[in-house]
Image (spheres, grey):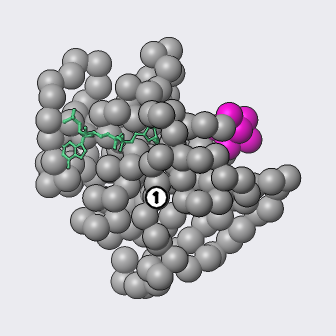
Amino acid sequence: MGKYNIIVAMDSKNGIAKNGKIPWDLVEDRVYFKKITTETKDKSRRNVVVMGRKTWESLPKNNRPLSGRINIVLTKQKMDAVETVASFEELEKKLVKIAEKIEEVFIIGGEQVYKQALDKLNIHKLYITQIQRDYGCDQFFSEFRDRFELEQQEKHRDFYFSRLTNRNRGV
Ligand SMILES: NC(=O)c1ccc[n+]([C@@H]2O[C@H](COP(=O)([O-])OP(=O)(O)OC[C@H]3O[C@@H](n4cnc5c(N)ncnc54)[C@H](OP(=O)(O)O)[C@@H]3O)[C@@H](O)[C@H]2O)c1
């Protein structure tokens, strides 16, 4: 089965959202997110994006499900438009069933789902877009620096694309 990764964009205070929305509009980050979550080495496989119900609802209707990726939404509710799971245990079972078809699994938010993913899953890599500004966010990403170390960093105007790897090499 594909390894678990997290991809997140945050501000200088680890903020990820304000009033239920991402308070920046960074074209480069949208392009980067699409590339990282879509590209596979094995062209016969696809990546999975896993998100909470509120993040799903925050996506523009004409942009969901996210194309070229298997979308899975965590929710206790019934939804028709997308595949859902009611727990992380159910998610793992589903991923085992489709293991032959998938390459990487990306946890794409939001706050609640990131927190649980960091606690419950063996996260292999973190892909972080860090914007060097404080947007006064009211939702945050948990502290991660003790568990992950920097592997690669690309500096742009006023943001970085960073890739961190789990310090526990067995993951
Ligand atoms: N900056 C970034 O990179 C980034 C990325 C993604 C999202 N965001 C932002 O984050 C915000 C949303 O975050 P959020 O924490 O409010 O919501 P969320 O994590 O997207 O979704 C929360 C919902 O997911 C479901 N859920 C969570 N854990 C579950 C579990 N263990 N089992 C089953 N269902 C579970 C529940 O849905 P039900 O209530 O339906 O059961 C819960 O209400 C939005 O503002 C979004 O724009 C930012």
For image coordinates 47% across by 46% down, the residue present is 138
**Ligand 1 located in image quadrant:** top left
For image coordinates 61% across by 76% down, the residue present is 150
Give the main secondary structure of the magenta stretch: helix
For image coordinates 40% across by 45% down, the residue present is 110
Residue 70 visible in the shown view: no
Label 1 neighbour load within 10 Å: few <14, some 14-19, many 20+: many
Q: Which residue position is annotated with label 1?
A: 141
Relative to 27, 9 lies left or right: left
Give the secondary structure at mark 1.
loop
Is ligand 1 closer than 8 angstroms to the Cβ of mark 1? yes
Range of the magenta residues? 25-31
Q: Position of residue 84 (x, y in %)?
A: 22, 34
Q: Position of residue 36 (x, y in %)?
A: 58, 49
Number of labelled discs? 1
Q: Is residue 167 above or below residue 132?
A: below
- Residue 23 part of the magenta segment: no
Relative to 1, 151 lies left or right: right
Q: Quadrant of the C terminus?
A: bottom left
Q: Quadrant of the N terminus?
A: bottom left
Outermost residue, top direction?
62
For image coordinates 44% across by 79% down, the residue present is 147
Q: Nearer the viewer, residue 67 or 110?
A: 110
Q: Is residue 125 above or below residue 28?
A: below
Q: Position of residue 70 (x, y in %)?
A: 37, 36
Q: Position of residue 47 (x, y in %)?
A: 43, 45
Q: Amino acid at mark 1?
A: Phe
